[in-house]
Amino acid sequence: MAGEQSLPSRLLLADDETVHIFDLSDPKWRATLTGGSGGTGKIANVEFGFTKNEVIVFSDFGLKATIWSFLTNRGVEVRDPKILSRGHSFRPSSGHLAILVRETMKDVIMVLSPVTRRLETSFPIATVDAQGLQWSPDGRWLVTWEAASAGFHVLVYTADGYLFMSYFGGQDPDTPGLGVRTVEWDSRGKFLAVGSYDSQIHLLATPNFNCIAVLFHAGTINNLNASVWEEQIDASKNRNYVAAPKPACPPSQNPTSNEKPGGTGISHLTFDRSGSLLASQAESTPSTVWIWSLVSLIPHSILIHHSTVKNLQWHPEDPERLLIHCATEDSVVHLWQSSIDTPHIMPVPLSKPGGRTEASWVQSTDVSPANPVIMLANTLNYALQHVPDAGEGEMAMDTSLSVVVEGLGPEDMFDEGNSMDLSPIKLSHEQFGMGLDAASDEVDDTFDYRRHLTLAH
């Protein structure tokens, strides 16, 4: 729910054919999209839109994307979306949706209006094989980038389709390098970070998009100004960080034997909320996290772990807390905080093992940024753990927040007494009573529930 300032209040569950939406503040409210992909195969991806009243469903094989609205009770179809997850972006200030499509062998950006999702403008872009799309936080710029096969190329457009600049990473456009893997804005739109397949980060500063620094992930760490920490595990499987001697050499391949070999390039790239710190991970050293100062443009801290790093997540309100989730069988999370000398590793015990785990910060009106909570979950259960302040002593599990949800599905957890069904087949005036004129004497159009958006040739 990228467009809303309030905390998330709806939950989305989907399988290959059906999407269920639940309201956490009203357990009796429910919406169901039956055949949400519109009869074009299985559902490949589904996300909330700009608000909680909007859902985007991508059909299999990239045939179309359908934007469903709970306010208008209609779906708007976009043909031939190019990418399932990175190929669309909402303008933060207004809610305009920019979506990347492939039309007659050309990459095209379509811009749809808020709420109604009518086509406002579309324009071809100067790419061979665009790989993503992002609005800037201030809504002034649209950034897209080429596939690695087309070389290092980042393009910045204005909202009306004017190509403002192209950035080739200091390379000759006719001699393509390894290309772009990740692109990320800071929260204020001051910096654009571009991670390449050769494990470098190009830091561009707005409004001219000049490259102010290229950050290197060195195989040997000699920087005397950076704190280097290494995870250690004792015989009792207790984990902690210790200061690593310099020069330090991060492992250059996955240290866990049962994991697949790593790829290349910058796989994780994320700014903190203040825009003063940048965390990154390179596939060449997959267990190492680099935290860069954007004031000095050098590493602030470097953390070396026993397992591959799965995810990096800054606290959404406290700019100095970083959550690091590693691919380990133990129920632990790794935490770094700029105001604390030593990073720490926190156990979050799960009652039952259940496949892959995910970790995230908890956002709630009951959780203060000064008293943060982390959730660790697998397919069978989850646990919520309070992160104590420095000096609070040993971290104790808050058992009152630990819940086992084995065997429960959406049908068991929610009352269907006030269910809303947005299936195109079942849509009717009587079912909704909003956004439709129930007294109309006109014959219903069988396909009135949706509109098709295509580009004129």
Image: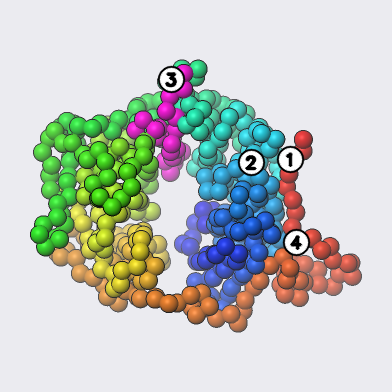
Task: Report crowding for label 3: few under 14, some 14 to 19, many 20 or more residues within 10 A (C-alpha).
Answer: few
| Comparing labels 2 and 4, the label whose residue is closer to the camera | 2
Amino acid type, callout 1 = Leu
What residue is drawn where x is 46% and y is 27%? 152
The residue range painted magenta reads: 175-199
Please identify the quarter of the rendering in which residue 220 is found: top left
Q: Is residue 392 visible?
A: yes
Disc 2 from disc 4: Cα separation: 23 Å
Disc 1 from disc 3: Cα separation: 34 Å
Q: Is residue 110 magenta?
A: no
What residue is drawn where x is 73% and y is 44%? 454
What residue is drawn where x is 63% and y is 66%? 33
Q: In the drawing, what numbered circle is on residue 455?
A: 1
Q: In the drawing, what numbered circle is on residue 142?
A: none
x and y percent of residue 277 in the render?
A: 32, 41
Is residue 448 found left or right of 104 in the rendered image? right
Which residue carries the number 3 mark? 171
Q: Earlier in the sequence, mark 3 or mark 2?
A: 2
